[in-house]
Image (tube, rainbow, N blue to C red):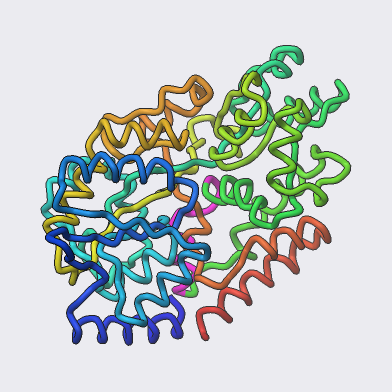
Amino acid sequence: MTKITKKLLCIAMSTILLAGCTGSSSANGKITLEFFSVKSENIGIYQELIKEFEAKHPNIHVDLEQPPEAETVLRMKLTKNDTPDIIAFNGNPTYGEIAEVGVLHDFSGSDLVDKVQPKYFDMLDRLVGPERDGVYGLPYATNADVVVYNKQKFQELGLEIPKTWDEFINCLEIAKKAGETPIEFTLLEPWTTLPVWNTLAANLVPENFGELKDAGKTSFAETHQEVADKMLTLLQYGHRDNFGIDYNGGNRAFASGEGVFYLQINSSVPEIKRINPDIELGTFPLPVTNDPTETKLVSGVDVALSISKDTKHKKEALQFIEFLMKKENSQKYLEDQKTFSAIKGVTQDNSTYDGIRGYFEKGKLVSFQDHYYPTGLGPENNIQSFLIDQDKEAFLQKLDKEWEKVQNR
């Protein structure tokens, strides 16, 4: 957490504790709960679930808020003593910063905690840091970085799912020699560098890199040489306009049959299928070493549910979260969003994900590395610049300097 953010949120916390109120209200005999979500893609399924909840609880109205630039809006609400009753976070540094200052309800000891796969609590705990014990967010939905592949092309080229880095490079060579675009890159948008970066870093660098970096015990220059080298290797298998196509353009291109592999977040799959419902897709984790037993799927918390510590309607807020976390409702969310669930016993059965399902079942998961970088580092812009100018040493040294600069603000 940066010094500026600490100061801002400590001020917000003090204000809230003094005032002891939140955004909820009661009117016409009904209790209104403010449900703030930082994601906009899931508004439809939330509205559907809210409608069902309100039918079962006619004395409660749930007011869904999903503004643009939601995390910025949420920070502003904190400073104005307007904390929502219920917050659906991404599992990223913003969650950690807000949980750390003590404005969220502690779910420790709740039966709801037992409904969630423990690995995802570990990921959230590391965001909050060791200074504050407790459970301030309930992991609900999860996502993953995957290699998406075109099954038809895969079959035509005689490929098999690679288990090692060398096997994957061999697949790329076969595709290239056959005149195909091995990898459909979308590097016009810097954030699309992150799925590859996170997959390589999460499997090649210690999972607690962020903590070690904060403590001055490691650096990008020391630990990310192989990550950078392998990013440049993969770049050789892209197309002529790697930096001229954005994410939406890449989805359209892949849906129309361009590219054999697509290294993206799993949310690209429903977008591609929406454009071309007939395309057959598969997924697998990118193998980054030559030891198949070392490969882990990069997965993180896409949605974590929290409650304001000071809400006037904690009982009703807990009822709503308990409703969302019921297996049947979690399954509805999962099927609508084509994502994965942190709730035990709720599984993604779509055949597109056959290649990664076992990693969830066996818990062979590792978190997104960039979720533990300080807010404001902006690694994606530096990674994009590196892929353009390909000066590895300067890139890694710049990341180290930028990290220290952000931490010292």
Between 223 and 1, the residue placed more toward the observer is 1
What residue lies at 58% left-to-right and 33% top-to-bottom? 269
- The magenta segment is 203-215
Quadrant occupied by the N terminus: bottom left
What residue lies at 44% left-to-right and 74% top-to-bottom? 215
* Left or right of residue 348: residue 234: right
Q: Residue furthest front?
A: 28
Residue 318, image x, y percentages: 17, 53
Main secondary structure along the magenta-highlighted residues:
helix
Q: Quadrant of residue 363?
A: top left
Residue 336, image x, y percentages: 43, 34
Residue 44, image x, y percentages: 43, 43
Does residue 286 show up?
Answer: no
Q: Is residue 206 magenta?
A: yes
Q: Is residue 398 magenta?
A: no
Q: Report the label total.
A: 0
Between 91 and 48, the residue placed more toward the observer is 48
What residue lies at 41% left-to-right and 74% top-to-bottom? 75
| 351 over 295 or under it: above or below | above
Does residue 383 show up?
Answer: yes
Between 333 and 242, the residue placed more toward the observer is 333
What residue lies at 47% left-to-right and 33% top-to-bottom? 338
| 248 over 136 or under it: above or below | above
Q: Quadrant of residue 175?
A: top right
